[in-house]
Every structure is written in structure tokens, then in C-alpha cells.
Image (cartoon, rainbow, N blue to C red):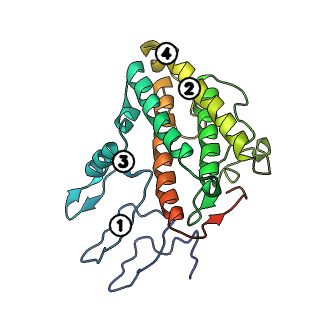
Amino acid sequence: MTDVSGAKDFEGATFVKASFKGATLRSCDVSGVTMRSVDVDGLDIDSHDLFFGSLFVNGVDVVPLVDAELNRQFPGRELQNAQRPEGLREGWVAVQSAWQTTVAGTPLHLVDARVEGEWSLAQTLRHLVLATDAWLRGAILRMEQPFHEIGQIFTGAEEMGFDMSIFRAEPPAYEEILAVRAERQQLVTDFLAAATPALLAEERENPWGGGDWRPSVGDCIRVILEEEWAHLRYVRRDLARAEHNPSPTADRTPY
């Protein structure tokens, strides 16, 4: 396997009759790539940013089709874009119910299973703690240091200058993860219970900085909902694979 991490040698390149069969592209920029007369049998694309742009297959933008299908598979997902408090409350109930089903139905021997380097269920729950801390405790409530020490930070945060000393070096026990996660879920529930249209319209700072975007309180809640639905999909995808793998990789090392 050839590792070309960080290389930009292929920007603007043209490949003719080349074989990429079985290749893996991870955290790569493939925006604007044109593919003609290609064999795409089994091509697997997973993009968190898919719904912010377009993806044409045989001249058809398939993004709206993918979005509609995911809404069908995950009832309540469409409410992640709700603009009013009641819609956001309903969306939050839906996604938490879906998460409860997944967590309760996962055998303990799979909570740390990682598939193809992706986060395990335990790590994903820690990341959702971090997301709630960033967007609710940090952005909305303006806490100076909003992060719990078991939060799972995203890859590349240290290179961005984020203070990694906030977080515990050793992975926590699963029971502690569930307890902290439940606390953060209740925080969102309580906040939404009292949210008003006027509050949702208030402006806040982007908790991760950078750019000129100043999200509203409603935007911050919608980011939390988007994180919840996206990571639920990832976890269900990977758990399904792990259940069919007689020896899934269990990794207690932070990702």
C-alpha cells in the first residue's frame, strides 16, 4: 500500500485507463473531480459535507435523493433543520430515542470495536459529549471552559492549537461515558424546554473560531442535531460490520 498523505501531486491531474480498484481515500479533497466512462461497481462514498454541495451521477444531482433516503431510514432526521423551538424539541426527542435503541442493543464486547480505523461506539459517545459542550455550554451558554475531560476531540485539533491538556489521557470506563453522556443529553433537553423564538435568534460566536460565521443560538442547536444524526449513522454502519466480523478490533487508545 502506498501512503501519499498530505501530497498535492494529483491536483488538476488527468488519469486515463488507471486502476484505483480497492483504493481508500480518507480526509481527501475530491471536490470538482470529473469521472467519465468509469466502472463504479461497489464504489462507496461517505461525506459529512455531502449536503452542502452537489454530487452528479449520470447528470443527476443525487444529494437530494440521498438526503430523502436518510430521512426515511432515520425518522425525525429531517427536523435537524427545524427553525422553531417545537420542531427542534421534536427532533431532539427523535434522535435521542434512536440513540437509546442503538446503545441498549449493543453488546458490551462491541462498545470498543473499531472498524477500519473509525471511532468505536464508546469514542463516538465521548465525541457527542464534546459536541454538546462546544455548541451548548461553550457557544450558547458562553462558559469559559465548557469541556468535560472525557470528551473525544476531533483529529487535527492539536495542530489547530487546541489545548489538549483539557482532556484525560486514559480512556474512561464505559459506565462513566454513559453517565456523562446522560448529563449532557439532559442539558439539551432542559435548554430546549425553555427555548423561545427570540432566544434562538440571538447571535453567538463560533466555538471553534475561524471564518466570519456568527451562528445564531438556533444554528448551534441544529449543529448538535446534525452531529447526533451523522454519528448515529456512522455507528450503526460500523456496528453492523463488526457484528459480522468474528474478531473486530477493540482499541482503548484515544483516536
Q: Position of residue 85 (x, y in %)?
A: 42, 19
Mark nearer the viewer, 3 or 2: 2
Residue 199, label in figure: 4
Q: In 3D space, how far apart are the residues under numbered discs 2 and 4 (Cα atoms)? A: 14 Å
Q: Nearer the viewer, residue 21 or 207?
A: 21
Position of 27 relative to 144 (above/below): below
The 10 Å Cα crowd at callout 4, few under 14, some 14 to 19, many 20 or more, is some
Indicate which disc, 1 or 3, sits on the residue closer to the N terminus: 1
**For marks 4 and 1 on the same chain, the one whose residue lies earlier in the sequence:** 1
Q: Which residue is mark 3?
A: 51
Kindly give the residue lying farthest to the left in the view shown.
59
| Residue 210 lies in quadrant | top right
> Relative to 72, is 132 on the left or the right?
right
Q: Assign the C terminus to one quadrant of the image.
A: bottom right
Which mark is nearer the camera, 4 or 1? 4
Q: Which residue is mark 1?
A: 33
Q: Residue at x 59, y 53 (%)?
A: 107
SS class of the residue under badge 3? helix
Going by the numbered disc 4, the residue's amino acid type is: Leu
In the rendered structure, the answer to whether residue 46 lies left or right of residue 16 reads: right
> What amino acid is labelled 2 in the image?
Val
Residue located at (77% from left, 41% from top): 166
Tell which tag, 1 or 2, sits nearer the viewer. 2
